Amino acid sequence: MDDIRLVMGSLNTNQVMDQLAMVAPDAGGIASFIGKVRASGVDALELSYYEPLTLPSMQALASDAHVRFDLMGLVMLHRVGELAPGEPIVCVAAAARHRRDAIEAVDFCMDHLKSAAWFWKREKRAGQWHWIEPRAADHADLARWAGKNAPV
Amino acid sequence: MDDIRLVMGSLNTNQVMDQLAMVAPDAGGIASFIGKVRASGVDALELSYYEPLTLPSMQALASDAHVRFDLMGLVMLHRVGELAPGEPIVCVAAAARHRRDAIEAVDFCMDHLKSAAWFWKREKRAGQWHWIEPRAADHADLARWAGKNAPV
Amino acid sequence: MAVTIIFLGPLRDLAGTESREVPGPLDWAGLLDHVGEAVAEQLTEARINVACGGKVLSDKTQLSAQDGEEVALLPPVSGG
Amino acid sequence: MAVTIIFLGPLRDLAGTESREVPGPLDWAGLLDHVGEAVAEQLTEARINVACGGKVLSDKTQLSAQDGEEVALLPPVSGG
């Protein structure tokens, strides 16, 4: 039921949500997070990846999420290439019987995609490209999961 | 920018998400939770409310969420009346500069809507109506917010 | 004019009606008298709240509803 | 056949190229020799990982790439 993908073209998040609702009709809830390029301040965003590692690392993350949370479906779509302001970068959605499994799975996957998955991100501002590293807050967010409900 | 409503007819969650993305173009992320009537097991669900308390309590909850989290937009739509299997009951979505504000705001609002907002819920199973009370887990979820980042 | 008592959620089933008009003013003892034995028994439990004029009472036994006011009997909630 | 070195993220800018072919086999000392001074300096930092044949090395100084294999230099990641 999972849909874990790198997306080259545009990302239709509504379609993703509709699809997840269809494959998990008995879910009591669907949580989601959509990360976007801010509409102002940047000219463009570029996501690069390394084929042999990036998708396998996302699939491993999805497996971890299933071990930690009771899920009926999980979607994890991540754009690669150059993105325009306002475009979605990432869409994570989880369907579960109970709402906290769905919400926590999304939180867990996003924390890992932000600072522990094989992506490199740069922003173009005023015509110049700048590489982005995770903020201290991103590392702190990731550390919350260490040892907690660890996969067995 | 907020949209806090009781909804009598059907609830178009995709429209809600698109609208929030439009009113908060500089949000880095949008988190959401959609609670649904499970497709199997129940014939119908009925949500009743008390006009003088219910919407004001949702508006107060939205204000609380703004005090606790740095939000650029908040949507909280709750169905009332009789619902069919598969229909969305509630849709909470939050737009924020940083993802954890968005995700935590949705978590916070859902915990309160589940067991601290003026709704009464009953399910029809095998032709019989049964009133539903929050599960112990719902009370525990709600208690997580007591005293934590309390509004000043 | 009268006081309107509103029965919410499962109390509606127990009372057999959504609302009832009773002569005002209405205090706690009067309320217990007017709602029937089954509802009165529930009302004495801490988990049942009472609102008067759109405000939830911090102490329901201090109820003092005037003619034209609405008194709502609020069992434990469940939304979402 | 050769070993292909892949420069990811900011290391691509520093190397001035996305990849470079060097004769195999390639060990840690050889890698430092072939990537240029700027990249070599970065590589010695703990925050840069090295993958060989699609596996991230737990100890990059133990690198032992054979002809036909790909060696990827992985700076700190940032997604989402």
Image (cartoon, coloured by chain):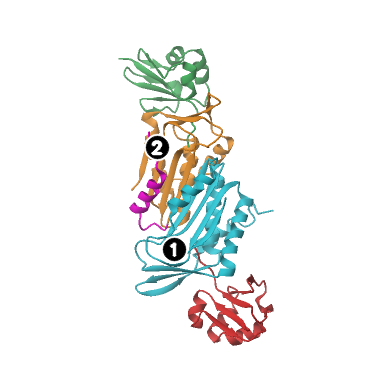
Chain colours: A cyan, B orange, C green, D red
| SS state under label 2 | loop
Q: Taking A47 as reference, is C26 above or below it?
A: above
Report the side of D48 relative to B11 (left or right): right
Asked whether residue B149 is in view, the answer is no
Asked whether residue C27 is in view, the answer is yes
Task: Please name whichever residue, A109 or A84, is drawn nearer the observer in this view of the structure.
Answer: A84
Which residue is found at the position 47% from the left and 16% from the top?
C15
Q: Are marks 2 and 1 on the same chain?
A: no
Which residue is found at the position 48% from the left and 83% from the top?
D16
Q: How would you rate the neighbour count of disc 2 (Cα within 10 Å): few for under 14, some for 14-19, many for 20 or more?
A: few
Which residue is found at the position 52% from the left and 20% from the top?
C42
Q: Quadrant of residue A36?
A: bottom left
Residue at the farthest front position: D1
- Magenta residues? B7-28
| SS state under label 1 | loop
Q: Quadrant of residue A141?
A: bottom right
Task: Please name whichever residue, B112 or D54, is drawn nearer the observer in this view of the structure.
Answer: D54
> In the rendering, at what x and y percent does residue A56 appear?
60, 63
Q: What residue did someone put label 2 on? A: B10
Task: Please name whichever residue, B74 or B122, is drawn nearer the observer in this view of the structure.
Answer: B122
> In the rendering, at what x and y percent does residue A124 appear?
39, 71
Report the side of A33 relative to B26 (left or right): right
Could you tell me the amino acid type at mark 2?
A: Ser
Which residue is found at the position 58% from the left and 73% from the top?
D47
Q: Chain of mark 1?
A: A
Q: Taking C55 as reference, is A16 above or below it?
A: below
- Residue A9, numbered label: 1
B20 part of magenta stretch:
yes
Distance (Cα) linking label 2 and label 1 = 32 Å
Task: Please name whichever residue, A114 or A60, is drawn nearer the observer in this view of the structure.
Answer: A60
D3 part of magenta stretch:
no
> In the rendering, at what x and y percent does residue A120 appear?
50, 69
